[in-house]
Structures are given as structure tokens and as C-alpha cells.
Image: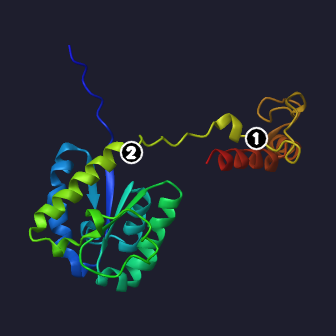
Amino acid sequence: MTPTPTRRETVEVFFSYSHKDEKLRNQLANHLSIMEREGAIKSWHDRKITAGSEWAGQIAEHLESARIILLLISAEFLASNYCYDLEMGRALERHEANEAVVIPIILKPVDWYNSPFGKLQALPRDGKAITTWRNRDEGFTQVARELRSVAAALPPRQPTPKPDIKSVLVLPTSIIPLPDLGKWPPNPFTDTSRVGEDRFIYWERSYSPPSRLNVGKQFFTLKG
């Protein structure tokens, strides 16, 4: 019996692009749709932000979680302060830290070779801009095939280890003394040596509530 292949994790792909190139982005997304149907990738771009959401926070969140970041290069992209300085800047930082793979996709002819991403392997091959292809679908198909290979070659994401509560919970007993259990004052409700309200006042003053409260506060603060 042939063993069932292990299903790989879905790779998040982030589109960084100028809105003036939205039609080209849509065409690229169409070529990647088969990979989405297979569960190989999950693409994200700012047009997926729902109404009422804080857009800058949504972009930053997906820019941090994506494992593949596509820079859709054109003159409009290079002229956009948001695309160039914010999105591309953070994408290259994550690329240098081996947290994500940044791939420039050359949409239109533009002088990009001396840019910060000029050292990266761009698509289509040889940096031939998509709009210069006689048949653009051929260019997008080449990009899609290369992206499939990149996504398949990514190692599984390592799960974030959960902190050991035993190593985190360290009560500062040298600062907050714990009460001596053997020297607690008598229970005001069972001590027959005092009567009425005097018994409760005696017990309350004998046992220091602030110490108990401070210990509890430290516990819940360290536990998170």
C-alpha cells in the first residue's frame, strides 16, 4: 500500500504592490489560484481588509506572518513611499533574518537593478517585465511555477514554545515574607477567648493582609 503523503502547511503569500498595478496583481493572483485550491499557499493583499478594520494594523500583521513576500515592481511601486519605505523595508529586514523569502516580480520596465532588492533573484527570469511579453500569460505561468517550487522548499514553521510556568513563577520571598503557618493567630470565629467584634479585629490586625495580597499579585503578574 502506498503511504499517504504528509500534507504540507499552507504558506502565506503577501502581495506588496501599487494600487495602480491592481489589474496586473489580479492576473497574477489568478495564476496562483490553483495553488490556493490545493492548499499550498494562501495569498493576502490589502484589498482583503474588511470594512471597519484598522488597515495599517492588518497590513503590518500579515507582513509579519507571511513566509513569502512578493514585491510587484513598477515605476509606480518605486515612487510609492508606503510600498518602498514601509512594506519593502520591513520585507527585506525579514528576508535578511531568514524569516521570510522576498521575491521581486517585475511587472513593468523600470530601472530597479540598483535598488535595495536588486541583489535578489527576480521573476520572470532575467528580469523580463511581464508587460513586455507578447503573451503575458506565459510570463505569469513562469512566475507561478517558480513560486510553487519556492513554497515547496520552505521548511516547516517551527511552533513557538510555550514557557514553562515552573521556570517563570518565582515568588520573591526575600522581599515579601510569607506568614508562618505555625504562628497564625486563632480563628476569630472559633477562638472562645475573645467575644464579639473584638475577636475579628484582633485576628485582622495579627495577620497582615497586605503580605497575602502582594504574594497573590506577584503570582498572577508572573503567570501572565
Circle 1 or circle 2, nearest the eye? 2
**Which residue ends up furthest to the top in the rendered image?**
1
Q: CA distance from mark 1 to mark 2?
A: 39 Å
Q: Which residue is identified by label 2?
A: 154
Give the color scheme: rainbow, by chain, secondary structure or one colour.
Answer: rainbow
* 15 up-or-down from 173: above or below: below
Q: For label 2, count other residues whose C-alpha is less than 10 Å away and answer few (under 14), some (14-19) or many (20+).
A: some
**Viewer can see residue 10:** no
Q: Position of residue 8 (x, y in %)?
A: 31, 37
User: Would you place residue 222 above or below residue 81 in this image?
Assistant: above
Tell me which residue sits at (44%, 56%) in the image. 100
Of pointers 1 and 2, the one earlier in the residue sequence: 2
- Disc 2 marks a residue whose amino acid type is Leu
Question: What amino acid is found at the position of numbered circle 1 in the picture?
Answer: Val
Mark 1 sits on what residue?
170
Q: Secondary structure at mark 2?
A: loop
Which image quarter holds the N terminus? top left
- Where is residue 143 drawn, in percent x and y? 23, 59
Q: Residue at x 85, y 32 (%)?
A: 186
- What percent of the width, then of the height, locates residue 24? 18, 72
Between 203 and 75, the residue placed more toward the observer is 75
Q: Which element is circle 1 on? A: loop
Q: Nearer the viewer, residue 72 or 49?
A: 72
Around disc 1, counting alpha carbons within 10 Å, would you say few (fewer than 14), some (14 to 19), or many (20 or more)? few
Residue at the outermost left position: 135
Q: Is residue 218 visible?
A: yes
Indicate left or right for 93 with 171 as reference: left
Q: Are marks 1 and 2 in contact (CB under 8 Å)?
A: no
Label placed on residue 16? none
